Image (cartoon, rainbow, N blue to C red):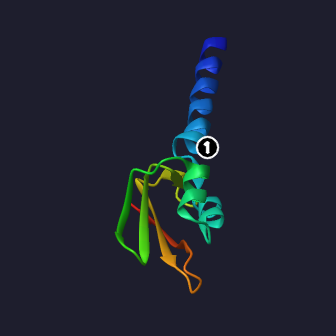
Amino acid sequence: MFRRFAIAAAAAACLVLTACGGGGHTRGMFTGYVMGKTEAEIVDKYGEPAAVDHSSPERTVITYKTKTFDPDNSNRTDPETVVFLQKDKDGKVTAVDVQYRG
């Protein structure tokens, strides 16, 4: 009986850790933090992205893999989280949009 309980508790802990660690951050918390932040600030907080596109001087696109999860969809991990940064009127490139793909 105790063995079954221990296995169930371990499985529940794994699910919680996956939602909080594997997929990392809720969509709302991630978006709330990155909006208006620079690339350096985002990378400092969330680590190196899977890809960065600097092909346009007016815009940067940062792509993270499995960094966020959707709490409104059974904590499903987002395969890609894409942050769009754009140059503002002062010339500073900051995050203006986030898209969750997959």
Picture quadrant of residue 15? top right
**Amino acid under label 1?**
Cys
Residue 71 lies, with reference to residue 61, above or below; the image says above
In depth, the one of 52 and 21 nearer the eye is 52
The quadrant the N terminus occupies is: top right
Q: Residue at the location (50% across, 50% down)?
A: 67
In the image, 1 versus 53, the foreground residue is 53
Identify whether 18 is placed above or below 58: above
Q: Could you say whether the residue bearing mark 1 is in a helix, strand or loop? A: helix
Estimate the x, y position of residue 8 in percent, counting from the top left: 60, 25
Q: Which one is nearer the viewer's eye here, 37 or 82?
A: 37
Q: Which residue is mark 1?
A: 20
Residue 31 versus residue 68 in the image, above or below? below
Residue at point 51% right, 79% down?
87
**Residue 40 on image: x %, y %:** 56, 58
Look at the image and tell me whether residue 90 can be seen.
Answer: yes
Residue 10, x across and y down, in percent:
60, 24
Q: Position of 75 compared to 66: left or right? A: right
